[in-house]
Amino acid sequence: MATQVRHSRYLLSFGIFGFLSTVIACQSGSQPVTGVCPEWAQSIPRDETHFYAGGISGPTPRVADAWDQAIECAKEKR
């Protein structure tokens, strides 16, 4: 019986620790970058041998999704 109570306490402590760790980790996300767009990103280069396009993405929680959205946006602007 005492062993079962001890295991229950460990399980409860682990659950509380896990919950608090998750809450703290989710709150420490980076802030979006705001400000003036850099000059190099305001114009698309032009030459006779390559195609260039610029694309942007909306806010996404995953960086990979932002890249995919920006690529699709650039492809649509051809």
Image (cartoon, rainbow, N blue to C red):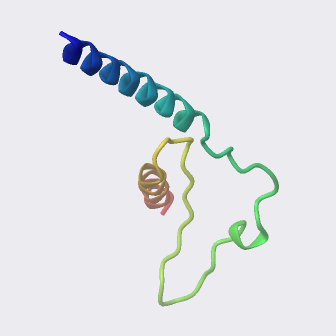
* Front residue (pair 47, 63): 63
Residue at 25% x, 21% y is 7
Residue 41 position in % (x across, y down) = 69, 68
Residue 65 position in % (x across, y down) = 42, 49
* Front residue (pair 16, 30): 16
Residue 45 position in % (x across, y down) = 63, 79
Residue at 76% x, 66% y is 38
Q: How many labels does the image show?
A: 0
Residue at the limit of the structure toward the top, as seen here: 1
Specify whether 50 is left or right of 31.
left
Residue at 64% x, 46% y is 30
Residue at the limit of the structure toward the bottom, as seen here: 49
Q: Is residue 43 above or below residue 68?
A: below
Specify whether 76 is left or right of 4.
right
* Front residue (pair 78, 62): 62
Q: Quadrant of residue 54?
A: bottom right
Q: In this view, does 43 lie above or below 10?
A: below
Residue at the limit of the structure toward the front, as seen here: 2
Q: Is residue 16 above or below residue 38?
A: above
Q: Quadrant of residue 31?
A: top right
Q: Is residue 47 above or below residue 63?
A: below
Residue at 72% x, 66% y is 42
User: Quadrant of the image for the N terminus?
Assistant: top left
